[in-house]
């Protein structure tokens, strides 16, 4: 116990360290305990934080803040309207059509599996194919039950979405408009000496802003390129599949590998082993290669690089805590941890003579 006591005395004798640790603990506890209740508030804070970057750019060009806030908010509302009434119906129709095609897709897949023992008897047997088909049917039955469960709660989900659509724009506007007042109000309750926490926030602010801005443009670029590429080859559900590929960049390493499966499956069920399937497969590989080796280095040149082990660990930890949202925000949260560790006072223990 003596080494532990000395460690606590060495690190937590500094009031700044105590305040930083307490602030992180409070924020983490509030998100974990009240995350569902405060969902609209937390989402509005994130959106206002993203839009604040555009407001700052306009302020640097001598545009009054109130005018900048109004312009950015109006553009945000127009974009939200286009997404809700233009893009969402298209994605919904393509998703509905894809779900309706699932029985035909499964039938073709079963036929292809049943031909494997005749072509490769030394690798796979009829019994193995039958077991695989039975397992797929069990998984699809379970998936169908979950879909029914979700559909039963769809009314509640619609009401929740409507509440979000009403409350969040209002919250976003006031978070941007009264940003200085809100920050001053919070600082009024903080101790006067919080330089360590301020240094951590400045580092995190720069890194997260660069990361989120880069990811936003990466999603749009990858989505657009995939949509136009798949549409050029006449692939079904081009908009839906392009969106999936674009969103997959939010999950490093894992996202690209997972989304490759539906891309190739839909292309194979549409064309089979044909030149069209080969062209789409090669084009998709080229897009992934350009994204990883050209686009990412350009967009994230100013972001502190995290080791792949740290990224995967962050995905596992934060994904286990907050589910899909934890996976999406794993990199910013890992950046926060890195900033805290970098700013944490490092004191060498006294050496005995």
Image: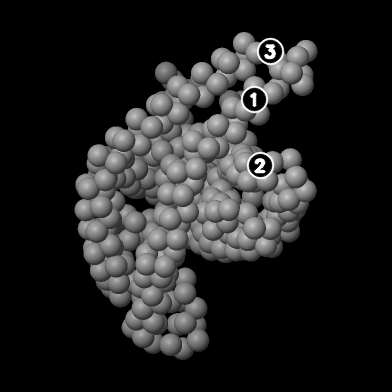
Distance of mark 3 from mark 2, alpha carbons? Answer: 23 Å
Q: Nearer the viewer, residue 164 or 206?
A: 164
**Point 50% across, 50% down: residue:** 332
**Point 24% across, 41% down: residue:** 153
Distance of mark 1 from mark 3, alpha carbons? Answer: 10 Å
Secondary structure at numbered mark 3: loop
Quadrant where the C terminus sits is top right
Residue bearing mark 1: 113
Distance of mark 1 from mark 2, alpha carbons? Answer: 14 Å
Q: Is residue 62 above or below residue 153?
A: below
Q: Residues within 10 Å of mark 1 (few under 14, many from 20)?
A: some
Q: Does residue 148 appear left or right of residue 315 in this picture?
A: left
Q: Nearer the viewer, residue 124 or 66?
A: 124
Marks 3,2: beta carbons within 8 A: no
Number of the label disc, if any, that sits on residue 132: none
- The x and y percentages for residue 71 are 39, 82
Q: Nearer the viewer, residue 297 or 19?
A: 297
Q: In the rendered structure, which disc, 1 or 3, sits on the residue that comes first in sequence?
A: 1
Q: In the rendered structure, which disc, 1 or 2, sits on the residue that comes first in sequence?
A: 1
Q: Does residue 336 appear left or right of residue 177 in this picture?
A: right
Quarter of the image for residue 40 reads bottom left
Residue bearing mark 3: 125
| Residue 336 in view of the camera | no
């Amino acid at each position: 116990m003596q080494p532990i006591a000395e460690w606590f005395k060495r690190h937590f004798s500094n009031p700044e360290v105590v305040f930083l640790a307490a602030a992180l603990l409070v924020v983490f506890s509030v998100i974990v305990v009240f995350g569902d209740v405060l969902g609209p508030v937390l989402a509005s804070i994130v959106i206002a934080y993203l839009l604040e970057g555009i407001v700052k750019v306009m302020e640097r060009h001598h545009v009054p803040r109130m005018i900048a806030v109004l312009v950015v908010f109006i553009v945000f509302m127009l974009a939200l309207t286009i997404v809700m009434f233009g893009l969402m119906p298209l994605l919904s129709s393509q998703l509905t059509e894809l779900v309706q095609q699932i029985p035909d897709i499964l039938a073709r897949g079963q036929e292809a599996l049943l031909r494997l023992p005749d072509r490769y008897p030394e690798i796979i047997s009829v019994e193995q194919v039958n077991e695989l088909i039975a397992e797929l049917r069990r998984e699809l039955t379970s998936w169908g039950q979950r879909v029914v469960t979700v559909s039963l709660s769809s009314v509640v989900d619609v009401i929740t979405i409507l509440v979000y659509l009403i409350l969040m724009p209002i919250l976003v506007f006031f978070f941007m408009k009264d940003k200085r007042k809100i920050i001053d109000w919070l600082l009024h309750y903080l101790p006067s000496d919080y330089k360590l926490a301020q240094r951590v926030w400045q580092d995190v602010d720069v890194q997260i802003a660069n990361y989120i801005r880069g990811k936003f443009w990466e999603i749009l670029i990858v989505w657009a390129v995939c949509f136009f590429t798949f549409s050029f080859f006449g692939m079904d559900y081009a908009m839906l599949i392009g969106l999936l590929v674009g969103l997959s960049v939010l999950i490093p390493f894992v996202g690209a590998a997972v989304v490759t499966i539906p891309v190739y499956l839909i292309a194979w069920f549409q064309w089979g082993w044909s030149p069209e399937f080969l062209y789409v497969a090669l084009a998709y590989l080229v897009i992934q290669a350009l994204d990883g080796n050209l686009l990412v280095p350009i967009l994230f040149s100013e972001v502190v690089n995290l080791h792949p082990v740290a990224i995967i660990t962050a995905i596992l930890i934060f994904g286990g805590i907050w589910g899909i949202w934890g996976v999406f925000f794993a990199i910013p949260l890992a950046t926060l941890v890195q900033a805290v560790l970098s700013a944490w006072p490092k004191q060498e223990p006294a050496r005995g003579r």
